[in-house]
């Protein structure tokens, strides 16, 4: 059953389109994550879906009812079934308990009912030990949990979260992500969660929609978006660092030979000779070996002798830029980078499987 549906929604600010969404539906009980770079229209989308702002054009349905033009009490009725958590929540200078309870002030509930709801939300947000704490003394992560508990106490069927973790360090982020996911799933909530972080989107979402320049460029299961990006924009955004323009030179039993600048690459595909396409390769799928090892038999369809151009240690992994003769970047563990003596100017073996090469249309 559909909870929310947006059809041909557009939003312009002056001359510029901030949003142009052909179709977006959110099912009952689903967590949809919308992921895209800063300025791609995520907050605008949330403001429109949550009826805080009117679209310039298009239609919005909440449980089958058209809602984008509702006014007054009818609009309020729908608003009461939604809650929104913003990136920078506003608090009152009092206790965690008071701040969580504030959303329930105007709900027709007995004191005991309110108290029960507030305590339950505080518990599910992992804030029990801070119930009486002054909000001004909280860390950024704790403050965000208060914002979540406040919305969770409202117990609305639909909840919107606009980059609630954006300002948190990695540890706080991980603990908060798990808390929010469990709390939402535990109550079977429907949620739209917006973030610029693809791994966060993939972790939290039942479905991920990638948004770029105001439009949805791909929507699907997290693994689909991560491993089968629909185009180069999505591929780059999901961290596929190697993207190469190519033309199919021959095709035989499902294996393509693709000409790229300075060489050929074998990939899996059904495209005909002459087809222009883009090849995507994750840096972690490209193996580096001592160049003598290339002569040994192996199942890698792609192997090259290359020159190391640049080496960038980044903690546990090292990024190695090689020329073979087309340019690629590979990740190796920093330990093996040292053990193999990978330094600029060295000759090295590069290899990867045809199945690691992701074939995309060149329409971008
Ligand atoms: P995101 O949340 O993905 O960072 P936003 O939805 O905030 O992106 O913004 C999308 C685009 O719309 C941006 O180019 C932004 O400058 C523009 N925009 C957003 N809100 C307004 C506004 N109230 N007036 C004018 N332009 C706006
Ligand atoms: Mg935003």
Image (cartoon, rainbow, N blue to C red):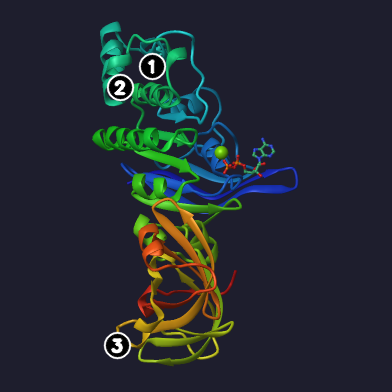
Rendering coords of residue 313 (x, y %): 47, 56
CB within 8 Å, label 3 to label 1: no
Looking at the image, which residue is at 38% across and 32% down? 172
CB within 8 Å, label 1 to label 2: yes
Q: Measure how far apart labels 3 and 1 are at the Cα level.
A: 64 Å
Secondary element type, mark 3: loop
> What crowding class fits label 1: few (fewer than 14 Cα within 10 Å), some (14-19), or many (20 or more)?
many
Which residue position holds label 3?
297
Query: Considering depth in this image, is 124 or 5 the residue closer to the camera?
Result: 124
Rendering coords of residue 316 (x, y %): 39, 53
Q: Is residue 250 above or below residue 42?
A: below
Mark drawn on residue 121: 2
* Label 1, ligand 2: CB separation under 8 Å: no
Choose the circle earlier in sequence order: 3 or 1.
1
Which residue position holds label 1?
100
| Quarter residue 276 falls in | bottom right
Q: Is residue 66 above or below residue 24?
A: above
> What crowding class fits label 3: few (fewer than 14 Cα within 10 Å), some (14-19), or many (20 or more)?
few
């Amino acid at each position: 059953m559909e909870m929310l549906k947006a059809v041909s929604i557009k939003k312009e600010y002056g001359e510029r389109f901030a949003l142009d969404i052909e179709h977006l539906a959110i099912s009952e009980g689903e967590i949809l994550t919308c992921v895209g770079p800063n300025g791609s229209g995520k907050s605008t989308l949330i403001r429109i879906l949550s009826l805080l702002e009117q679209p310039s054009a298009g239609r919005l349905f909440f449980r089958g009812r058209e809602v984008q033009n509702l006014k007054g009490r009818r609009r309020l009725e729908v608003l009461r079934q939604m809650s929104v958590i913003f990136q920078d929540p506003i608090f009152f200078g009092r206790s965690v308990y008071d701040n969580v309870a504030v959303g329930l002030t105007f709900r027709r509930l007995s004191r005991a009912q309110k108290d029960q709801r507030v305590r339950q939300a505080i518990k599910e947000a992992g804030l029990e030990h801070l119930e009486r704490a002054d909000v001004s003394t909280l860390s950024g992560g704790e403050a965000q949990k208060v914002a979540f508990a406040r919305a969770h106490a409202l117990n609305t069927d639909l909840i919107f979260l606009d980059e609630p973790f954006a300002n948190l360090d990695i540890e706080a982020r991980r603990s908060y992500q798990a808390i929010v996911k469990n709390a939402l799933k535990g109550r079977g909530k429907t949620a739209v969660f917006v973030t610029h972080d693809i791994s966060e989107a993939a972790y939290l979402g039942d479905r991920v929609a990638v948004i770029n320049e105001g439009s949805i460029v791909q929507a699907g299961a997290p693994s689909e978006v991560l491993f089968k990006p629909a185009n180069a924009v999505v591929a780059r955004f999901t961290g596929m660092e190697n993207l190469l323009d190519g033309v199919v030179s021959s095709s035989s039993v499902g294996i393509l030979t693709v000409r790229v600048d300075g060489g050929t690459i074998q990939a899996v595909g059904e495209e005909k000779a002459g087809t222009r396409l883009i090849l995507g390769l994750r840096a972690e799928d490209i193996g580096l070996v001592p160049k003598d090892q290339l002569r040994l038999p192996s199942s890698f369809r792609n192997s090259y002798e290359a020159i190391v151009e640049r080496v960038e240690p980044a903690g546990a992994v090292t990024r190695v830029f090689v020329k073979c003769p087309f340019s690629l970047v590979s990740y190796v563990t920093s330990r093996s980078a040292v053990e193999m003596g990978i330094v600029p100017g060295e000759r090295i073996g590069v290899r990867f499987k045809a199945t690691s090469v992701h074939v995309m249309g060149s329409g971008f």
